[in-house]
Amino acid sequence: MTERWTLRFGGFGGQGIVLSSVVLGLAAVYDGKYVCQRASYGAEARGGRCRSEVIISDEEISYPLIDHLRVLVIMSQQAFDRYLEELEPGGLLILDPDMVKEGVKRSDVVKMEIPAARTADRLGNRIVANMVMLGALQAKTGVVSRESLRRSIGDSVATRFVDIDLRAMEEGGKMINTLNKEFHGGSPY
Amino acid sequence: MTERWTLRFGGFGGQGIVLSSVVLGLAAVYDGKYVCQRASYGAEARGGRCRSEVIISDEEISYPLIDHLRVLVIMSQQAFDRYLEELEPGGLLILDPDMVKEGVKRSDVVKMEIPAARTADRLGNRIVANMVMLGALQAKTGVVSRESLRRSIGDSVATRFVDIDLRAMEEGGKMINTLNKEFHGGSPY
């Protein structure tokens, strides 16, 4: 049976939402998968919403749209308000609790809180928050291999950010085995 | 009236087809536009086809698919074979004549030949061919401003490639006023 992953990242301009999807997609290619990646954003001056999506499959992707969203990574309140309802039942929600102040009103999804912005600040640069999220996503789901994700980061980001991005990714991965133990169990996640 | 640009880049993995769409989309954001960007690729080991698309609009994009393709940038024979027919009548075809050996069998499109790979080789690195294409695209269409494209390249590519990428972009732009004089005229391009 074909395995098909559908993932969305939501936040605002400047958080590296587009880059997250590009890095994840390239990692999947390094794993030998087919990828469709998409992003919508704009009007920088107006502080616009930004979202990106990735579909990852073992087979060539003939239908490039997402009907059933399996994983939602949220980095802003506005994205949370807009996209939460589109996550499929049983899906995985990864959110930054410092960026989303309202509680999650759905009990049919798996929730994982990753303090990505705070962790990025601790590492020295807020802009690596997206890499904390990718590290957590990788460790939680295995949607791409850790090795491919590291390689993709190395190939995708500005040279001067490679080290801190890799550290941010590893910090995100570590959180899976510490902060979020309670979310393991019966769920596929 | 809303101006809506629809563009596709086609080639194979490793040519920076995804990056082209990301760089162009970010440049459009710097111009104050809304953007939807998409890419499909995969199975690196099999030398797969790669394509990316950008929609650029003055208004928020509610319909993120391309019905009418205005601009097609082609960097491989396989992409040429697959995508040429999807270019709308009157649309702009930018192709690398060293990568596409067959002639263009359509007379209802505007054709522009940009020897991007050859130019990139002359600059010292084949991987900047995509930036030659972006420079030519910018100069020909004005879909984004030159300043925003330069800024986007500076913000998107690895630090060590910024200089050569900007040079490649400028080389592409220069070709519009030399090699391709014959394509100016009655067409919107």
Image: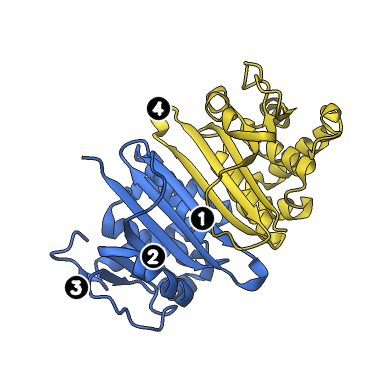
Chain colours: A blue, B yellow
Specify the subunit that label 3 lies on: A
Q: Is residue A107 above or below residue B75?
A: below
Can you identify the residue that label 1 sits on?
A39
Cβ atoms at labels 4 and 1 below 8 Å apart: no
Q: Residue furthest top?
A: B102
Between discs 1 and 2, the one toward the N terminus:
1
Q: Label 2, secondary structure: give it.
A: strand
Instruction: For mark 2, name the chain.
Output: A
Mark 3 sits on what residue?
A: A182
Q: Which mark is residue A73?
A: 2
Residue sitting at the far left: A186
For the residue marked with disc 4, what is the amino acid?
Arg
Identify the residue at image location x=73%, y=51%: B144
- Mark 4 lies on residue: B46
Give the Cα separation between the discs numbered 1 and 2.
14 Å
Disc 3 vs disc 2: which is toward the camera? 2
Earlier residue among tags 3 and 2: 2
At a point 57% along the width and 51% down the height, the residue shown is A159
